[in-house]
Image: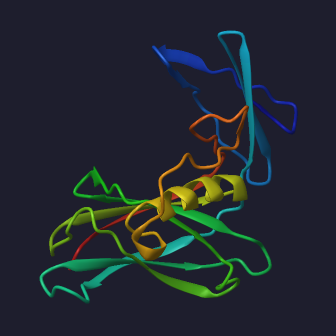
Amino acid sequence: MTDNKGNSYPLTETAPGNYTIDLLAGVPGNTYTMNVLTNGKNYISQSVMPAVVKLDSVTTKTSDFDSKKRQVIIHYQDTPGIANQYRVVMYVNTVQVKAVFAYNDDFNDGKYVRNEIREQDIDIYPGDKVTIEMQCIDKPVYTYWLTLMQQSDSGPGGGVTPSNPPANISPQVLGYFSAHTTQTISVIAK
């Protein structure tokens, strides 16, 4: 892996098929390039690390459909004049919710956002620990996750015909490469 500043970051195979790198702190605005040579074939991808948009808080409220269950709300101030894309990963009592959440600021550029995360995989009750990870992602990675989100139950009309999402890896494969910021907040549902 390399960046647009001329730095090289070799990855180490830590288990068969798993490659890691120690002590790499990405820099917002930098472009990172992944280059993989396997079985005589070269795969390449680039991702620009966006600036951080601070996740202010995570709250819960009584579900609109069942007073025993809780709904999760994330709060953040979108940066004005910059196209921002987000991926949200939710855990309930350390179990990752299967639903995919991808958002952009097309309709809330520069506004304070109060976004209800509507998941249907795991019911949330008072006392449950909810962890939200908010990633600021670039446009190609957003397109990948948005396509997956639209294919799930949360997509328009309940979903669309499954197909491979558009990857940012060339030649096309199933998967993506992302240089993104990440923030995590945990709360106890009330």
Residue at image point 66% right, 85% down: 107
Note whether 171 is above or below 62 in the view shown: above
Q: Position of residue 33 (x, y in %)?
A: 76, 35
Furthest residue in direction left, as rendered: 68
Residue at image point 45% right, 14% down: 16
The answer to whether 182 appears left or right of 106 in the picture is: left
Name the foreground residue: 115 vs 66: 66
Placement of the C terminus among the 4 image quadrants: bottom left
Note whether 16 is above or below 145 in the view shown: above
Q: Position of residue 15 (x, y in %)?
A: 44, 16
Q: Position of residue 188 (x, y in %)?
A: 24, 70
Residue at image point 22% right, 57% down: 93
Name the foreground residue: 95 vs 162: 162
Name the foreground residue: 7 vs 31: 31
The answer to whether 123 appears left or right of 55 in the picture is: left
Residue 131: name its quadrant: bottom left
Placement of the N terminus among the 4 image quadrants: top right
The answer to whether 49 appears left or right of 94 in the picture is: right
Residue 10: name its quadrant: top right
